[in-house]
Image (cartoon, coloured by chain):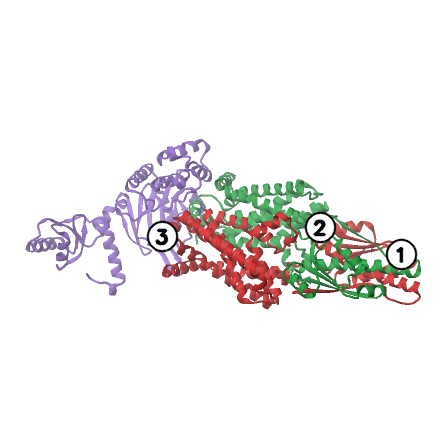
């Protein structure tokens, strides 16, 4: 408790042993982490891992079963209403009113958040410009495309310029260009000192974050900067192999001893191995003997996806060793 | 085809009964309605709270009062002694009738004159008031008949009965004239209409509103299969409710069933075709569940009020009477009451049955035609 | 509680209503249809009961007797028949609701100064109409009997016989005993419940179903602000419906309005707040539109239609049902409405009803607020 309060000067979000059960199902299991002010914190995990449940507890709409935490300096258990004044929240569903126009949706939320009348117009124009909806301010929200709705929803959620914003899979179902633009916006906000807490399952988006937390089956299994995760948390090494007929080569490489996993990756293969040097030699040797023209075999920094998959598999192995089936 | 319909049905039933409260609504609401109609909707007037303002206070006036108080229709709640109390009691609604006998009543009566008897009735509820007036008329006439025969006997010098007409009343089909016997069979018709209309119209619109409709429409399901999947569950629920209400009516309220049960179910089937057809039609013209609900009521209110369920059709203006011919409920009520109370069969009921079948076919055909246009 | 947030919600709700003109239109048209139907088309007054007659006597006396029925507005003799089979057919096919069978020796019995039996068969399946028809027939028969008796005395003794009683029935408040005067005031209560059931019971459930509620509860808006904001636009529609009903009652149906008009509207406002809050409470508790719509029927509309004394007098109901009617707020409102309309009385007489109505409003508002949780389950 004390550590939670002490840190609230530099941190935007602190949680300790946060837990939520639905009946006998544990959706979030004793999760602890911190998010510093101004940071973009990415919350990663497969569907159903507990991302949304965690976010809902942080924004004060779902009571935790156990554990403590603060958001923007307010206790998530007792000061939910204070929290709501200091955060913005946008969910994957873009929950705007379909039958209201762009302008009316903004007006509604600026009424709810009580935007100072003097700033109201400016904020509204900012949202409309930010979302690129200058020509659609009087259109019903129902007819807008996904990217527009998403930016409008973000705009409505941050009309009151909250210091912390929570985005729950904000880019699901949005085209790559819109996603790019959306992240530019997030950077802009973060540049102004806004703390952004974002959940996603896009690996490329994870790379944009300052720090990441990885949640799996309700438990936080890793946390750190993308760099730390990639270099420190991966127990195995990753090799990149570029050669002819990678699909056939895959089968050959899998036979070598000490090879954990082979996967197609772009034009080549990613091979997870226990030890780089020995494996490079073994693979080059084998492929040359079998007549594959090899362009490259070398150790690389693993991608987040590699780390992610390897951490999850390690977790699964630890929990259910008897069920593991080796390929 | 049957495989797909089967899965549609399973899905619908899962959705309807997912929420345990919904089960309560579907199976409890009809029972509550029968109980309410069976007990509350009674136009049998008895034990009317009555005040007596007897200014004469003679043996003769007391005898007259006892004629009222002795029946089960009037309960003397208060004897009053001044004029102001009359207004007070009626304004507060404490009594609904006041019997006022003026001073000199007994003397006039003995002298063979015509004394006055005043009865004041609270007319705010005009039906009850009408019935109360009927009772008072009956009682005073009976009383005057006796006085008359006494006078007559005195003139003749010997006791005789004056000539008179005696009504020998025989209510058919419902010997004790219980309003319950009249309403309970009708409740079947209105409950089934409400439940099937509302469930059908909202269930389709719900899919539109949530967006699952689009998903279903891109599967190989044909509109006919979809419509069947959307109507059969509600038809089954409708029939289950008919059985439920019938059981409550027969075993709890002891409403007689004199006719053929098979005919009742056949007619219910025809009738359900019309309600499901209208329900589907509503769903094709509604985009939100709110609209569907409103449209349901837009149809339901006039259908119930203009069916003869509570208000006799014969009392309606002629133009409105013509309108009732378009109302499936009108026909079904005749059939249900005919089967329950009169025990009559297809020989008499065939025009109503035919009307229901034709209307059912037309609404279903029209609904599915519109449905294809709007959804594909 | 902040007024500006309440206002923001109210304005949004108002836009939803405007955007769905059909629902709004029906919120106004349905009450109008109800008023028109009850005002013009529907009546519980029984008249022109179709009757068949089998006059086996075919005498002057029997024709005199029947003229009592022919002259009555309550009976309409549709056919003279000759045989029991025809009577049977006429009643079974509902061609006639009543049949009079006059015996062969009717005239002889009357002339001999004896009792003459006349059989009256009624279709009892519609017990109300049957009951009323029997009452009318009794009256006709008794007045005929009296005339015959008086004539008989005159013929035999040469002296006139005074009628023993001058019976003077009077009806207060609704002198002509028109059922529209009795139904239209009560209908206002029913209409308000319809508005509550149809319009408000879905508003919160809809936001849960569509997911907009999750967004809304993540904002600082408070439960009472949200609920009051949602109440306000529907309150306006409801009051508009009341105004419409009062105007139609006054100018179209000539229902006498004897009491205070401000009191009428004041009480309507109090009742409306309670009714709408009940609608919202249903919406809050169910979170599903399908369920909310069904529950609204059972909890708002049916009781106000059947158990409030709107059409069926509470004092005629069995004791346990009468107790239930005490917890139905529409009961108090209906009796207030009838008091104001027909009796012209005010709060001095109906303070208890008004107080209970106020209590209902307060309890509903508190319950709706209390049950609304800004939390997910």
What chain letter is assigned to the residue under label 2? Answer: B
Mark 3, Cα crowd under 10 Å, few <14 / some 14-19 / many 20+, is: some
Could you tell me which residue is drawn at 41 percent across and 31 percent down? A122
Could you tell me which residue is drawn at 54 percent across and 50 percent down? B299
According to the picture, the residue beneath numbered tag 3 turns out to be A16
Task: Give the number of the disc on residue B124.
Answer: 2
Above or below: residue A79 compared with residue B163: above
Report whether A168 appears left or right of B132: left
| Chain letter for the green colouring in the rendering | C
**In x, y percent, where is residue C373?**
48, 50
| Chain letter for the red colouring in the rendering | B
Choose mark 2 or mark 3, whichever is in front: 2
According to the picture, the residue beneath numbered tag 1 turns out to be C162
Q: Are marks 2 and 3 in contact (CB under 8 Å)?
A: no
**Front in this rendered view, residue C375 or C37:** C37
Choose mark 3 or mark 1, whichever is in front: 1
| Chain letter for the purple colouring in the rendering | A
Mark 2, Cα crowd under 10 Å, few <14 / some 14-19 / many 20+, is: many
Q: Are marks 2 and 1 in contact (CB under 8 Å)?
A: no
Q: Which quarter shows the C terminus of chain A?
A: bottom left
Above or below: residue B7 compared with residue A293: below
**In x, y percent, where is residue A57?**
39, 50
What chain letter is assigned to the residue under label 3? Answer: A
Judged from the image, the secondary structure of the residue bearing numbered disc 2 is loop
Above or below: residue A264 compared with residue B266: above
Q: CA distance from mark 2 to mark 3?
A: 69 Å
């Amino acid at each position: 408790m004390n550590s939670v309060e002490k840190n609230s000067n530099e941190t935007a979000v602190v949680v300790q042993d946060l837990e939520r059960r639905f009946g006998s199902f544990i959706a979030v299991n004793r999760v602890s982490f911190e998010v510093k002010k101004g940071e973009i914190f990415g919350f990663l995990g497969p569907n159903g891992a507990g991302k949304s449940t965690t976010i809902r507890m942080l924004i004060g709409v779902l009571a935790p079963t156990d554990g403590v935490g603060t958001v923007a300096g307010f206790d998530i258990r007792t000061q939910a209403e204070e929290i709501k004044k200091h955060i913005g929240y946008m969910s994957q569903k873009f929950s705007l009113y379909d039958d209201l126009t762009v302008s009316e949706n903004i007006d509604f939320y600026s009424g709810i958040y009580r935007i100072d009348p003097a700033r109201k117009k400016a904020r509204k124009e900012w949202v409309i410009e930010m979302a690129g909806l200058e020509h659609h301010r009087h259109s019903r929200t129902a007819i807008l495309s996904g990217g527009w709705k998403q930016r409008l929803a973000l705009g409505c959620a941050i009309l009151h310029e909250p210091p912390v914003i929570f985005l729950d899979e904000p880019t699901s179902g949005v085209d790559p260009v819109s996603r790019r633009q959306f992240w530019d916006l997030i950077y802009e906000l973060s540049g102004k000192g806004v703390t952004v807490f974002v959940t996603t399952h896009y690996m490329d988006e994870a790379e944009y974050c300052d720090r990441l937390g990885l949640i799996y089956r309700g438990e936080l299994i890793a946390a750190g900067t993308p760099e730390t995760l990639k270099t420190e948390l991966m127990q195995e090494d990753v090799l990149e192999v570029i050669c002819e007929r990678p699909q056939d080569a895959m089968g050959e490489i899998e036979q070598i001893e000490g090879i954990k996993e082979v996967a197609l990756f772009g034009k080549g293969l990613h091979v997870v191995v226990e030890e780089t040097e020995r494996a490079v030699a073994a693979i080059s040797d084998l492929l040359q003997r079998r007549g594959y023209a090899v362009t490259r075999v070398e150790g690389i920094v693993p991608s987040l996806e590699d780390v992610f998959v390897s951490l999850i598999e390690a977790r699964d192995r630890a929990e259910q060793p008897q069920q593991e089936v080796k390929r | 085809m049957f495989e797909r319909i089967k899965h549609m049905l399973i899905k619908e039933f899962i959705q309807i009964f997912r929420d345990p409260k919904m089960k309560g609504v579907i199976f409890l609401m009809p029972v509550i309605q029968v109980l309410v109609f069976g007990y509350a909707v009674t136009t049998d007037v008895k034990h009317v709270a009555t005040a007596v303002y007897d200014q004469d206070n003679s043996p003769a006036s007391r005898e007259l009062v006892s004629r009222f108080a002795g029946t089960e229709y009037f309960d003397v709640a208060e004897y009053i002694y001044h004029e102001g109390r009359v207004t007070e009691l009626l304004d507060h609604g404490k009594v609904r009738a006041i019997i006022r006998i003026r001073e000199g009543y007994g003397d006039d009566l003995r002298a063979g004159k015509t004394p006055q008897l005043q009865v004041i009735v609270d007319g705010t509820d005009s039906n009850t008031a009408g019935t109360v007036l009927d009772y008072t008329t009956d009682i005073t006439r009976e009383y005057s008949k006796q006085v008359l025969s006494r006078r007559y006997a005195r003139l003749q010098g010997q006791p005789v009965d004056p000539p008179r007409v005696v009504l020998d009343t025989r209510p058919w089909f419902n010997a004790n004239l219980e309003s319950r016997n009249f309403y309970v069979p009708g409740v079947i018709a209105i409950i089934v209409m409400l439940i099937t209309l509302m469930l059908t119209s909202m269930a389709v619109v719900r899919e539109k509103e949530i967006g699952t409709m689009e998903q279903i429409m891109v599967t190989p399901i044909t509109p006919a299969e979809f419509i069947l999947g959307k109507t059969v569950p509600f038809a089954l629920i409708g029939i289950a409710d008919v059985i439920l209400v019938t059981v409550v009516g027969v075993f709890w309220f002891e409403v007689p069933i004199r006719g053929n049960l098979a005919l009742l179910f056949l007619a219910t089937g025809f009738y359900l075709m019309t309600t499901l057809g209208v329900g589907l039609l509503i769903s094709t013209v509604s985009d939100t569940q709110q609209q569907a609900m409103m449209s349901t009521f837009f149809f339901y209110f006039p259908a119930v009020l203009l069916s003869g369920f509570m208000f006799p059709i014969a009392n309606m203006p002629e133009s409105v009477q013509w309108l009732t011919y378009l109302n499936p409920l009108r026909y079904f009520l005749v059939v249900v009451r005919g089967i329950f109370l009169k025990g009559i069969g297809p020989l008499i009921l065939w025009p109503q049955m035919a009307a229901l079948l034709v209307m059912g076919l037309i609404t279903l055909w029209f609904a599915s035609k519109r449905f294809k246009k709007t959804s594909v | 509680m902040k007024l500006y947030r309440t206002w923001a919600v109210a304005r949004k709700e108002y836009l939803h209503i405007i955007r769905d003109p059909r629902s709004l239109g029906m919120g106004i048209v349905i009450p109008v249809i109800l008023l028109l139907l009850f005002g013009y088309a529907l009546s519980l007054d029984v008249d022109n009961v179709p009757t068949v007659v089998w006059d086996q006597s075919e005498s002057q006396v029997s024709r005199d007797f029947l003229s009592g029925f022919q002259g009555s507005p309550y009976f309409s003799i549709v056919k003279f028949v000759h045989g029991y089979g025809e009577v049977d057919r006429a009643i079974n096919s509902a061609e006639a609701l009543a049949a009079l069978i006059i015996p062969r020796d009717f005239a002889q019995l009357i002339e001999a100064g004896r009792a003459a039996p006349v059989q009256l068969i009624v279709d009892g399946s519609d017990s109300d109409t049957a009951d009323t028809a029997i009452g009318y027939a009794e009256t006709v028969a008794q007045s005929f009997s009296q005339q015959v008796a008086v004539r008989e005395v005159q013929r035999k003794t040469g002296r006139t016989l005074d009628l023993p009683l001058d019976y003077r029935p009077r009806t207060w408040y609704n002198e002509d005993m028109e059922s529209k005067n009795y139904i239209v005031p009560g209908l206002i209560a029913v209409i308000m419940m319809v508005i509550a059931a149809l319009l408000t019971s879905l508003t919160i459930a809809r936001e849960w179903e569509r997911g907009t509620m999750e967004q809304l509860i993540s904002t600082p808006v408070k439960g009472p602000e949200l609920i009051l904001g949602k109440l306000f636009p529907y309150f306006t529609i409801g009051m508009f419906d009341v105004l419409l009903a009062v105007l139609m009652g006054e100018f179209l149906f000539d229902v006498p309005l004897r009491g205070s008009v401000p009191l009428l509207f004041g009480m309507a406002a109090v009742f409306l707040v309670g009714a709408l809050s009940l609608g919202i409470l249903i919406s809050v508790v169910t979170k599903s539109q399908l369920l909310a719509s069904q529950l609204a029927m059972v909890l708002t509309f049916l009781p106000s239609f059947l158990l409030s004394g709107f059409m069926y007098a509470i004092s005629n109901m069995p004791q346990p049902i009468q107790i239930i009617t005490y917890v139905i707020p529409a009961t108090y409102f209906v009796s207030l409405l009838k008091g104001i309309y027909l009796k012209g009385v005010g709060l001095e007489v109906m303070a208890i009803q008004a107080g209970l109505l106020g209590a209902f409003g307060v309890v509903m508002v508190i319950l709706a607020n209390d049950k609304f949780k800004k939390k997910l389950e």
